[in-house]
């Protein structure tokens, strides 16, 4: 059974950079056709897809976040990473790493979800 676990700082100051780690167990992030995304949910709002890294390392981003977001991975550690710079208070959200067989921006298409990590952007 594939399991995902997010980790990172819970509180970040405005204008700073957010760095989150997703540790994947029970499956390899390089397994053919699998894709791994970051999705967030601001308080009182719906899920927002941020970007994806596919099994071959290719990445795709939400157009609205592309200029501030970077997704990478370390296959040796079976981890993926999210970096987001120039943080704003409206970036406050629960951040999830997710995985599945489709490389898609549709949150519901992902079979595997981490428990999520709260990130608050505040001075």
Image (tube, helix red, strand yellow):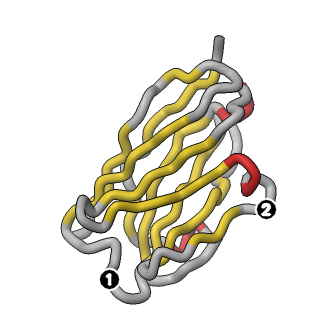
Name the quadrant of the N terminus. bottom left
Tag 2, which secondary structure?
A: loop
Q: Position of residue 115 (x, y in %)?
A: 37, 47
x and y percentages locating residue 78 in the rendered image: 27, 63
Q: Mark 1 points at which residue?
A: 31
Does residue 55 appear left or right of residue 51 in this picture? Answer: left
How many numbered circles does the render carry? 2
Please determine whether, in this image, residue 107 is positioned above or below residue 86. Answer: below
- Left/right of residue 109 with respect to residue 20 in the rendered view: right
Cα distance between the residues tagged 2 and 1: 26 Å
Q: Dot 1: what SS?
A: loop
User: Please, is residue 53 above or below residue 18 in the view?
Assistant: below
Q: Name the residue under label 2.
A: 63
Q: In which quarter of the image is the C terminus?
A: top right
The residue located at (64%, 59%) in the rendering is 49
Give the residue displayed 60% in from the left and 76% down from the top: 104
Please indicate whether residue 1 sits to the left or right of residue 120 in the image. Answer: left
The residue sitting at the top extreme is 123
87 relative to 52, above or below: above
Residue 19, given in percent of the width and then of the height, sits at 49, 39
> Residue 33 at what x, y percent from top left?
43, 87
């Amino acid at each position: 059974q594939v399991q995902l676990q997010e980790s990172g700082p819970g509180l970040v100051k405005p204008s700073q950079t957010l760095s989150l780690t997703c540790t994947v167990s029970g499956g390899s992030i390089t397994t053919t056709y699998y894709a791994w995304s970051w999705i967030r949910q601001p308080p009182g709002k719906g899920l927002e897809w941020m970007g994806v890294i596919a099994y071959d390392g290719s990445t795709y981003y939400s157009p609205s976040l592309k200029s501030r977001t970077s997704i990478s991975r370390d296959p040796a550690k079976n981890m993926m990473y999210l970096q987001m710079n120039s943080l704003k208070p409206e970036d406050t959200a629960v951040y999830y790493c997710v995985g599945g067989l489709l490389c898609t921006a549709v949150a519901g298409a992902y079979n595997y979800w981490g428990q999520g990590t709260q990130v608050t952007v505040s001075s």
